[in-house]
């Protein structure tokens, strides 16, 4: 399958799920980190990343699967099980960088990095992206695997104080300039490089406060001196909608990483905006998810050993 066909296949899958969702507002759109875990391969135990987390999390929510673990048809067979009759797969993308010369001969990354620029030029060595589409099934769609794959493990629910500690440590380690004050909106100001959040008591829950803070931190990572994304979009245009999706996914990835679920917006305007962007550009959702993964990695990569500097809650203004 050609790269553009892969992008189209993934985009079509997401569009279909989202359009079906707009007809059923009784469930959340997508909750990454459901049951305190990212989507992972049930055989290798490796976590999926980027657009694959988005795709699998969306399918997990839509189908109500009890575990966020996935297998290919052959992996299920190798493990002594099989896919239930009539079950449909979910596409995931495998991406890597390959190194090819002018004669279309492939070379290792080690060799590429060992050669200087002149040697690389002489061989005509260049980097090319390699995309492959795989199809996976949730463990709930299988039969006859080891019984442990069908057991629902009891999760130790995090209490508010534990959630506060982990989330506070993550957010403060970034050293972003965050102001908490009486406000009717949360936003990131690119000109002052400042995040403004409403008072904690204005939020319905601890999770909603931290999810919002991480959403704004997602925008913050786009600063020209950080990951340098386009933050100049205006409400309602394509650039704005794409950046909002990046920020929402960044928040979801970060929330999942610290152990709790993040429901991405149920706002119809955002959903329709994103659907429109995906229909115009079949790479839009893949690109947004990749940018969100980079943003989440950037936030999560701050040393956990740093002593956090607490955010200063400003007094309520009367």
Image: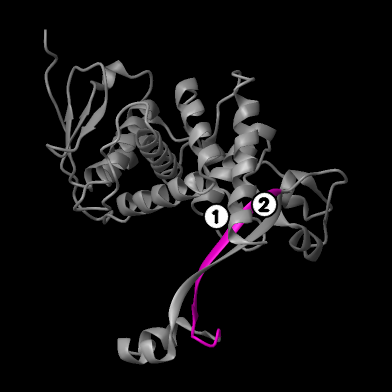
Please state if 14 lies on the left or on the right of 175 as rendered.
right
Residue for point 37% across, 87% down: 121
Residue 22 in view of the camera: yes
Q: Residues within 10 Å of mark 1 (few under 14, many from 20)?
A: some
Please report whichever mark, 1 or 2, sits nearer to the chain's N-terminal start.
Answer: 1
- Magenta highlight range: 90-104
Q: Which residue is mark 2?
A: 70
Q: Quadrant of residue 188?
A: top left
In the image, residue 135 sits, relative to residue 259, either above or below, namely below
288 is within the stretch colored magenta:
no
Q: Mainly helix, strand or loop, the magenta region?
A: strand
Displayed quadrant of residue 180: top left
Instruction: For the N terminus, give its image quadrant.
Output: bottom right
Q: Residue at label 1?
A: 48
In-image side of 309 versus 125 (left or right): left
Q: Position of residue 33 (x, y in %)?
A: 51, 41
Q: Residue at x 12, y 23 (%)?
A: 314
Badge 2: how crowded within 10 Å, few (<14), some, or many (20+)?
Answer: many
Mark 1 touches mark 2? (CB < 8 Å): yes
Q: Residue furthest right?
A: 85
> Disc 1 to disc 2, how far (Cα)?
10 Å
Q: Secondary structure at mark 2?
A: strand
Q: Residue at x 67, y 58 (%)?
A: 134
> Is residue 153 among what the camera can see?
no
Total count of labels = 2
């Amino acid at each position: 399958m050609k790269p553009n066909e892969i992008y189209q296949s993934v985009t079509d899958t997401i569009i279909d799920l989202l359009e079906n969702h707009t007809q059923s507002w009784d469930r959340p759109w997508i909750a990454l980190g459901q049951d305190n875990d990212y989507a992972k391969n049930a055989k290798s135990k490796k976590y999926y990343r980027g657009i694959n987390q988005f795709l699998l999390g969306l399918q997990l929510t839509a189908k109500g699967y009890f575990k966020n673990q996935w297998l290919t048809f052959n992996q299920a067979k190798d493990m002594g099980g099989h896919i239930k009759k009539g079950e449909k797969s979910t596409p995931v993308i495998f991406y890597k960088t390959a190194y090819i010369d002018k004669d279309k001969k492939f070379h290792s990354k080690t060799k590429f990095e060992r050669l200087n620029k002149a040697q690389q030029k002489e061989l005509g060595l260049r980097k090319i992206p390699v995309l492959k589409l795989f199809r996976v099934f949730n463990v709930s769609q299988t039969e006859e695997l080891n019984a442990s794959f069908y057991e629902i493990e009891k999760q130790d629910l995090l209490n508010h104080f534990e959630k506060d500690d982990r989330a506070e440590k993550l957010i403060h380690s970034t050293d972003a300039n965050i102001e908490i004050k009486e406000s009717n909106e949360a936003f990131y100001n690119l000109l002052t490089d400042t995040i403004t959040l409403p008072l904690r008591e204005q939020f319905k829950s601890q999770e909603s406060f931290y999810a919002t803070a991480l959403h704004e931190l997602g925008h913050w990572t786009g600063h020209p001196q950080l990951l340098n994304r386009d933050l100049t979009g205006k409400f309602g245009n394509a650039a704005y909608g794409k950046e909002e999706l990046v920020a929402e996914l960044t928040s979801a990835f970060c929330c999942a990483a610290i152990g709790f679920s993040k429901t991405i917006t149920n706002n119809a305007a955002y959903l329709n905006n994103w659907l429109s962007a995906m229909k115009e550009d079949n790479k839009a959702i893949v690109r947004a998810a990749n940018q969100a993964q980079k943003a989440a990695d950037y936030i999560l990569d701050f040393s956990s050993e740093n002593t956090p500097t607490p955010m200063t809650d400003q007094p309520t203004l009367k």
